[in-house]
Amino acid sequence: MKYLPEVTVLTHSAIRIQGPKTVYADPFHLTEAPHDGDLILITHEHHDHLSPEDIAKVAHAGSCYVLPASCKAAAEKAGLPLSRCLFMQPGESLEWEGVRIEAIPAYNVDKAFHTKDKAWLGYVAQMLGRRYYIAGDTDDNEDARRVRCHVALLPVGGTYTMTAAQAADLAGAIRPEVAVPTHYGDIVGERGDGEKFASLLDKGILCDIGM
């Protein structure tokens, strides 16, 4: 069942939220080029999250880009217009044309793909009267457990991030109204990981499988 008509997981971790502003996170493997992205959030510099060709498909002349401060060199290499980029440190917040963004640390705790010292990010985007937690590539960790949100978009594919079971545990700790699985069925994870995540969620948390 679709609980969040404004949210679409396009593929992998590519997320689109439609409100007064159109917000994308980590566009990747896109088949269309709508050029409608007002605010484009990039969680870190791995190729499946900072993809210049896919960013170009959603960007327009007035697009604003939000990235970790540690990714400034990667943003320049990718050809992003630095004058339109906002760089954030973990724990910072900003507001852009009515959309409030909070930078949440995103990191692994038992593997070395996304270490905390890299200062890569997830984001809480506040719009439409809701707080959307876009977790990025992360494990269940103490910083993720501090997040308060209405909607949690969590990676479930394992290998580089949480597994479906670990993501369900995190959802149980932060208690969103709706949880959405991401980061599976493309580079990592199986197509069934979304359904597995849904089956493991605590009662009272709705699941919207956005793919």
Image: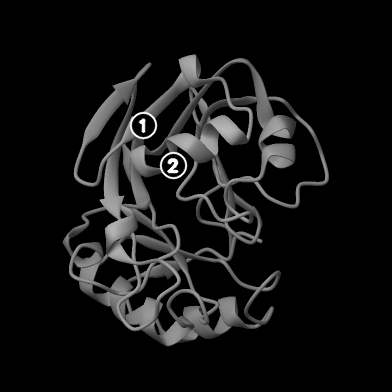
Label 1: how many Cα within 10 Å (few below 14, some 14–19, many 20+)? some
| Residue 132 seen from this side | no
- Using the image, determine if residue 167 lies above or below residue 16: below
Of residue 208 and residue 15, the one placed in the foreground of this image is: 15
Q: Is residue 26 left or right of residue 125?
A: right
- Check disc 1 and give the amino acid type: Phe
144 and 178: which is toward the camera: 144
Q: Residue at x 45, y 63 (%)?
A: 137
Q: Earlier in the sequence, mark 2 or mark 1?
A: 2
Residue carrying label 1: 87
Q: Residues within 10 Å of mark 2 (few under 14, many from 20)?
A: many
Q: Name the secondary structure under disc 1.
A: strand
Which residue lies at the image location 23% right of the left edge and 34% below the top edge?
A: 93
Residue 141: quadrant of the picture: bottom left
Could you tell me residue 201's position as x and y percent? 38, 80
The answer to whether mark 2 and mark 1 are in CB contact below 8 A is: yes
| Secondary structure of the residue carrying numbered label 2 | helix
